Image: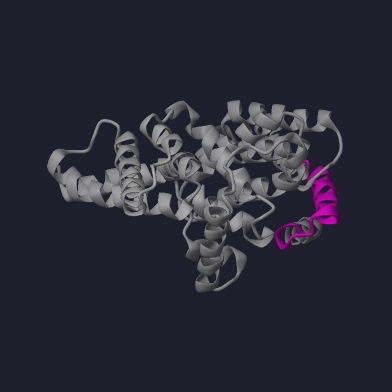
């Protein structure tokens, strides 16, 4: 086992499981910075020891064990210094993690990051970094701010979570409407950031993980139209991933529709019908999903209904006049 092989294995574990591992650790400690430090120590130890002992059969489990032991040692040291007993609830949780609970814990952390005690302006950036694994520099570019300023915002938010003892659990039903938009924006933002990288392994990247989180969120809430709209949008978008080859990717109209994933198209259409059946409010994600549905219909019909797409973009611009939607509508109108 070479150092290069170990580095590749560690990088793969970080790409696939960083957010899940961090969510599990933070759910127990309510200290995101502490969980991040412990996980960083685990990755550092992996890079030192894996070239010698080989990559473990379960790299994610190895990293989780090392990180939780690091946290337990820190808690024990603090207990000795202060002559205070170790929090047995935290210790028991760390000693007996439930791997099946990791996806739910990750979703819980998303909702925790949208807690009203945290500055709303940092809700989405906090989720993008802590739960979905993007660094402060990358997030800063998306929000058009200086990396240093974004890093400072994130540090303050994490301290607020720790100092206020904000719990990591799914809010009660009355609390959901206020928090859901930020959660959906973060999931969509993760998909968009990764999609814009235009790499050919997008089906194995955070983009597909974002789709999975969108479907999980919609399924958990059940009756939120916009949650189902986002699930439909990302599923329909990912259905075209097999045709995105080369750099840059071929334009949508130039993609070979025969390569599109028909099963994902059918799944996305089912999500969109579910959103429509739930009724108002009609939101941005439902309209964007409807636009994607119209494009994906080319796989069935061989043609594109541009008049319908223009009409949908007009509706989208009316309720969510983002720069991208306005530019797309202008281009479509010019073509027509």
Residue 318: say if magenta.
yes
User: Does 297 sit left or right of 97 as displayed?
Assistant: right
Count of numbered circles in the view: 0
Residue most toward the left? 52
Looking at the magenta stretch, what is its main secondary structure? Answer: helix
Residue 324: say if magenta.
yes
Residue 299: x and y, percent?
65, 33
The residue lying toward the viewer, choosing from 243 and 229, is: 229
State the quadrant of the C terminus. Answer: bottom right
Examine the rendering and report whether any part of residue 248 can be seen. Answer: yes
Residue most toward the front? 83
In the image, residue 182 sits, relative to residue 334, either above or below, namely above
Residue 201: x and y, percent?
43, 44
Residue at 48% over, 51% down: 31
- Name which quarter of the figure residue 154 lies in: bottom right
Q: Which residues are magenta?
A: 303-325
Residue at 58% over, 39% down: 108
Residue at 69% over, 53% down: 116
Residue at 35% over, 49% down: 83
Residue 188: x and y, percent?
63, 48
């Amino acid at each position: 086992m070479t150092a290069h092989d170990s580095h590749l294995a560690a990088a793969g574990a970080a790409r696939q499981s960083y957010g899940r591992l961090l969510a599990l650790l933070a759910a127990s400690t309510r200290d995101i910075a502490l969980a991040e430090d412990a996980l960083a120590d685990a990755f550092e130890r992996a890079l030192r020891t894996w070239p010698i002992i080989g990559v473990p059969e379960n790299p994610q489990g190895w990293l989780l064990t090392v990180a939780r032991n690091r946290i337990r040692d820190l808690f024990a040291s603090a207990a000795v210094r202060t002559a205070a007993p170790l929090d047995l609830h935290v210790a028991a949780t760390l000693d007996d993690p439930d791997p099946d609970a990791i996806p739910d814990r990750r979703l819980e952390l998303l909702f925790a990051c949208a807690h009203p005690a945290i500055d709303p302006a940092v809700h989405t950036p906090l989720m993008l970094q802590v739960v979905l694994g993007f660094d402060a520099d990358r997030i800063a570019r998306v929000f058009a701010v200086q990396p240093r300023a974004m890093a400072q915002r994130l540090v303050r938010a994490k301290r607020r979570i720790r100092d206020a003892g904000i719990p990591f659990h799914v809010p009660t039903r009355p609390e959901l409407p206020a928090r859901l938009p930020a959660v959906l924006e973060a999931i969509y933002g993760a998909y968009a950031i990764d999609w814009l990288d235009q790499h050919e392994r997008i089906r194995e990247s955070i983009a597909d993980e974002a789709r999975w989180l969108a479907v999980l969120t919609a399924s958990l809430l059940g009756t939120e139209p916009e949650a189902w709209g986002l699930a439909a949008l990302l599923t329909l978008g990912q259905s075209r991933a097999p045709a995105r080859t080369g750099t840059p990717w071929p334009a949508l109209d130039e993609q070979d529709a025969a390569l599109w994933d028909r099963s994902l198209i059918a799944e996305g259409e089912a999500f969109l019908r579910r959103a429509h059946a739930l009724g108002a409010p009609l939101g941005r994600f439902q309209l964007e999903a409807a636009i994607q549905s119209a494009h994906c219909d080319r796989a069935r019909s061989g043609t594109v209904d541009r008049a319908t797409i223009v009409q949908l973009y007009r509706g989208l611009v009316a309720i969510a006049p983002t720069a991208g939607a306005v530019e797309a509508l202008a281009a479509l109108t010019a073509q027509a």
